[in-house]
Image: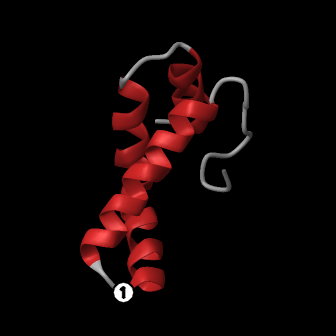
Amino acid sequence: MEDTRIIQLFRDRSEQAIVELAEKYGRLCCKVARNILRDVLDAEECVNDTWHKAWDTMPPQKPNSLRAY
């Protein structure tokens, strides 16, 4: 799914936004978190915190790219 559609799901407060975000960027975020934290459980918690923060900040934020956000 395109970032613009996922962002619109966040703006619509649809929980499907988290599902789509995790499907598109979950592997990347987990890999980055594991490389930094060196612990699988801590990395999973960090990624979950990231999804939560995205939920809390969109709206009002409307990023152009979720990968960079």
Q: Dot 1 surroundings within 10 Å: few (below 14), some, or many (20 or more)?
A: few
- Residue 22: x %, y % from top left: 37, 46
Which of the pair 49/34 is nearer the observer?
49
Q: Is residue 64 found left or right of 27 in the rendered image?
A: right
Q: Is residue 7 left or right of residue 65?
A: left
Q: Name the quadrant containing residue 20.
A: top left
Kindly state the secondary structure of the residue where label 1 is placed. Answer: loop
Write the residue at 52% across / 30% down. 6
Q: Residue at x 33, y 71 (%)?
A: 42
Examine the rendering and report whether any part of residue 2 can be seen: no
Q: Give residue 37's position: percent from left, percent from top.
A: 42, 81
Picture coordinates of residue 50 (x, y %)? Answer: 49, 51
- The residue that disc 1 covers is 38
Tag count: 1
Task: Determine the residue located farthest toward the top in the rendered image.
Answer: 12
39 vs 61, left or right, is left
Residue located at (38% from left, 78% from top)? 34
Left or right: residue 33 compared with residue 60:
left
**Picture coordinates of residue 36 (x, y %)?**
48, 83
Q: Amino acid at mark 1?
A: Arg
Q: Examine the rendered structure and indicate whether residue 45 appears above or below residue 58.
A: below
Residue 40: image quadrant is: bottom left
